[in-house]
Image (cartoon, rainbow, N blue to C red):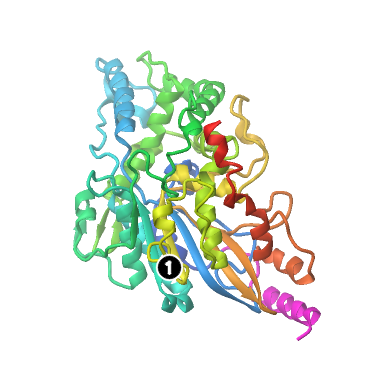
Amino acid sequence: MQISTLLSFILAVSAAQWPVAALGYDLDGDAKLNEGLPEATFHFQGQYSPRWLVPSTISPVTDAPSGCNITQVNSIERHGARYPTASAVKKIQATLTNIQKALAKVNASDIAEPSLRFLKTVQIQSGANDLVPYGALQAYYSGQSTAQVYSDLTALGSFVRSTGDLDGLNDRVIVTAQYWKLGFSGAAFPSGNISTSNQTRYAPGLPNIDLIFSELAGVNNTLDVSTCTANENQSPKPETAAQAAYGKSTLEPIIGARLSKGLAPANITFAYTDILNLMGECSFETLGRASVIDGELRLSGGNISDFCRAFTEDEWQLYGYANDVGKWAGAGYGNPYARAEGGGYLRELLARLTGVAPPLDPPTSLNTTIDGNTTLFPLDRGIYFDGTHDNNLGPIATAFGLFDGPALNASKPHAEQDPHNWYFSRIAPFQGKIVFERLQCSPGRNYVRVRANGAVQPATGDYGWCKNTTATDLDQQLAQYGLCSLDSVKTTLAWVNTDSEWSKCYQ
């Protein structure tokens, strides 16, 4: 078949079968998982949003364009929903203690704003750090969906990696990977009422995974990079500084002022940190109190947390941007070390896509003991799962060129109104996933497509991730489906096999 004829066939079939429209199916279980969670609230919580099906402007979404076959899948996924970290628990508790001390002599019925009256007596849940049942179900559905969408590749085998340490119960990513593998295998979700982290962790029948990177200090780990010294030593931390600037310019004068007025007659002044603490509890309380009964999700009392109802839809957009700008500065394009932090994983990804073992020198975050062993780093599998954290997924997306766009402004009042592409709830929410697919298209040419939480990422355009597209007619036509030739990807990512970025960590 001549290339011109092939292109006409691809365009005709694709236009007929795959119109750009909202998806009519439940990819990754997202419809079930988000039932009862208002979009105007839960889609604007940055890294604390639960994964949701992001609409794609490009179709097909999961099928390959006509004339192409998917030959490999690399799914890098954040852990599922968890309790707040131990340090975050202390912060929210301090905020609530101050509020409740100020309200001690005020009757709840006298508090000006009814939606805030619960703050007088509310107690937060006691858990910290661990994966919650909701997060386990997220991972299970993700694995199950992966097996269904890529059923033709399951015969080639899978390889499941995670980061964490079982000994210290630093295991939320590990347990996420176990539930992903359980769903991928086709086995049923554990039966009974699973309502605690320990029940989640010790449920019978959870499979072992193939590899765990330790997060102990000094260990090279592409899924949780902590060995880029210059990044670790940044002070103040870029995320903290960006949130402080936006918090003072926008959160305090708008949300803080309303809270102070709403809690009258008490006299309470809210710092931006108090606002972030309170709003973060919406997701943590709603998802953390949910249980899974015989594989079915149950919100506590069938309701979302009172912390969610305490804020308006407009205020949730401000909170979302506070998290967006924080992660843009700390784990994205605003961090000068983001490419260095994401480069190690991309070296591994490039090795898988090309079938060529990664160079072990010059050094990066690559663990040479693991990546130099074909048993621990195989290149012959059809499906790869990599479990990670939000602060690693952001740099990987940045280093690959995803979600690029105008710089996010931290100090400008209402900067959330400015155009930007970095919405962290679409990048690394709880159980967020970025899927790198390798495809083979007629006449035998390899391509790469990227899906993030259901949305195919534009390969070309002003902020497309395919930076060095070749000039063939087939390449140009397939670009509209989000495809970039593997040759172009190799050229774009050539830097990951050097120390051009990693050397900045020690300058």
Residue 224 vs residue 175: left or right?
Answer: right
446 or 178: nearer the viewer: 446
Please identify the quadrant where the N terminus is shown.
bottom right
Residue for badge 1: 145
Query: Quadrant location of residue 276?
Result: top left
Q: How crowded is mark 1: few (under 14 residues within 10 Å), some or many (20 or more)?
A: many
Residue 17: in magenta span: yes
Q: Where is residue 280 in the image (x, y as percent from the top left)?
A: 39, 36
Q: What residue type is labelled 1?
A: Ser
Badge count: 1
Kindly report the secondary structure that dominates the magenta region of the rendered protein: helix
Query: Quadrant location of residue 29?
Result: bottom left
Q: Position of residue 152 (x, y in %)?
A: 48, 79
Q: In this view, does 293 lie above or below 392?
A: below
Q: Which residue reaches farthest bottom? A: 1
Q: Which residue reaches farthest front? A: 361
Q: Is residue 502 above or below residue 8?
A: above
Q: In terms of secondary structure, where does tag 1 sit? A: helix
Q: Residue at x 38, y 68 (%)?
A: 144
Q: What stretch is highlighted in magenta?
A: 1-22
Q: Where is residue 226 in the image (x, y as percent from the top left)?
A: 42, 39
